[in-house]
Amino acid sequence: MNQRTRIKICGLTREADVDAAVEAGADAIGFVLYDKSPRRVSVSRAADLAGRLPAFVMPVGLFVNATAGEVALATQTIPHLLLQFHGDETPRECRQHGRPFLRAARMGLGFDLLDFAQQFADAQALLLDAHVEGYGGGGKVFDWSLIPPSVRRPVVLSGGLHAGNVIEGIRQVRPWAVDVSSGVESAKGIKDAAEMRRFCDAVREADAIRAASAT
């Protein structure tokens, strides 16, 4: 059976961008709850934006080494928030909230993804991003051949994706989902509606190619 590739668009800060992302076909919308990010929004602002989401479009909160209290405030304020941990959080720290979560993995030479996947076996999925200084992937593409084919966890492919390379990324990695931020922006935190449509269309094209090759 062919699996549709889910689409997450991250780092939204404006109502118009949330509406355009939903219209383009995003399955999940990410809100950056990390003070040092240029795409950062407050919990109350994220709640306002998440309130625009229709049923079956998931709000995702991105955290980097947040306190338990900060995460609890977000989960209490934004119903059905999926947690995404992008810092140095331990498996216990990710689990303690009792909520579904994604765990970001910073892919680089020498990184043992199989061991990481075992440590975070209760994550909903592993979000694979480029290893750069600081936190987040910096809009950089990592070497997709670093992903071992034997990884047994759902994978969200991230890191420097855009409409021009996501088809190849899906072909090579066959991820459960893809995650885009800077690849659909006109400026940091400002999304481009046309680029979001192009990205979502490219993901659907990649799925159509996979389905055709399987028949």
Image (tube, helix red, strand yellow):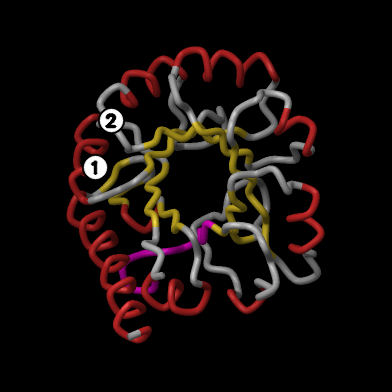
Left or right: 206 with respect to 157?
A: left
Residue where numbered disc 1 is placed: 22
The spot of residue 160 in percent (x, y) is 47, 63
Of the two numbered discs 1 and 2 on the same chain, state the one appearing first in sequence. 1
- Above or below 105: residue 39: above
Are the residues flagged by discs 1 and 2 in contact, CB closer than 8 Å?
yes
The spot of residue 100 in percent (x, y) is 58, 34
Q: Which SS does the magenta portion mostly show? A: loop
Start-end of magenta stretch: 156-165
Mark 2, Cα crowd under 10 Å, few <14 / some 14-19 / many 20+, is some
Left or right: 170 with respect to 49?
A: right
Q: Tell me the element at label 1.
A: helix
**Front-most of residues 144 and 139:** 144
- Above or below 133: residue 85: above
The spot of residue 24 in percent (x, y) is 21, 51
Asked if the magenta segment contains residue 168, the reply would be: no
